[in-house]
Image (cartoon, grey):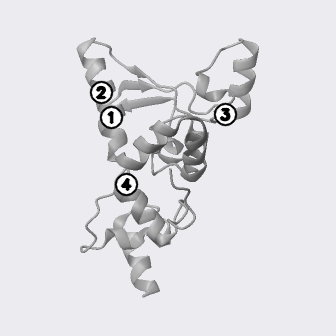
Amino acid sequence: MVAERERESCTVGLRVPKCLLYQFKQDFKLKVSDQCCVEFKEKPLKNWQKENKKPIKILGLMAEEGGRRARAECAVFKKEKLVSFQPLAKVSKEWEDWFIKEKNIRLCELYYPPYNFERTGCVGCPYNIHIQDELNTLEEVLPSARKQAEYLWQPVYNEYRRIGYRLESEEQMKLF
């Protein structure tokens, strides 16, 4: 069984937590993918770039944030043509904090009390490794956003809760 899971991990070609490998079997019906990031972030940006005749995209990705961003490079080329510039790709969190303080930059309200978010993204994104903490914060300060996330991501949340991954079980969860 373990050898079968290891082979599946190799054939999938992804770095997937072992407890989630079963999702790549043929009989798994819930379709889970990070492609929503492509659909709701990357494609609209490409469309805007094309519509506004901009030769490159300038993005604020930091490789240190991890996930898909871990592969971020400062300059992205396709066929020897610069298509994307990501000047923050190799910047550390410490440098970012220093720069914000040095230049007296005011951030989005979500980064300040009572919210205290460390970073934002799609509300309730199941790929957020701290999703339970985010949902707890939302429940406390933005309960309607929590309900919206629960509704939007319900099938994935239910599966995470069922297998005890990233989210509290139904018994542990506060009802709202």
Q: Can residue 154 be seen from the camera position used here?
A: yes
Q: Which sits earlier in the primary sequence, circle 3 or circle 4?
A: 3
Q: CA distance from mark 3 to mark 1?
A: 25 Å
Element class at badge 4: helix
Task: Verify CB contact (< 8 Å) between mark 1 and mark 2.
Answer: yes
The residue sitting at 67% across, 26% down in the picture is 112
Q: Which sits earlier in the primary sequence, circle 4 or circle 2?
A: 2
Element class at badge 2: helix
**Which image quadrant for residue 93?**
top right
The residue sitting at 28% across, 11% down in the picture is 52
Please state which of residues 77 and 12 is positioned toward the viewer in this rendering. Answer: 12
Q: CA distance from mark 1 to mark 2?
A: 6 Å
Q: CA distance from mark 2 to mark 3?
A: 28 Å
The residue sitting at 58% across, 27% down in the picture is 88
Element class at badge 1: helix
Residue at image mark 3? 116
Residue at image mark 2? 44
92 with respect to 150 (left or right): right
70 with respect to 50 (left or right): right
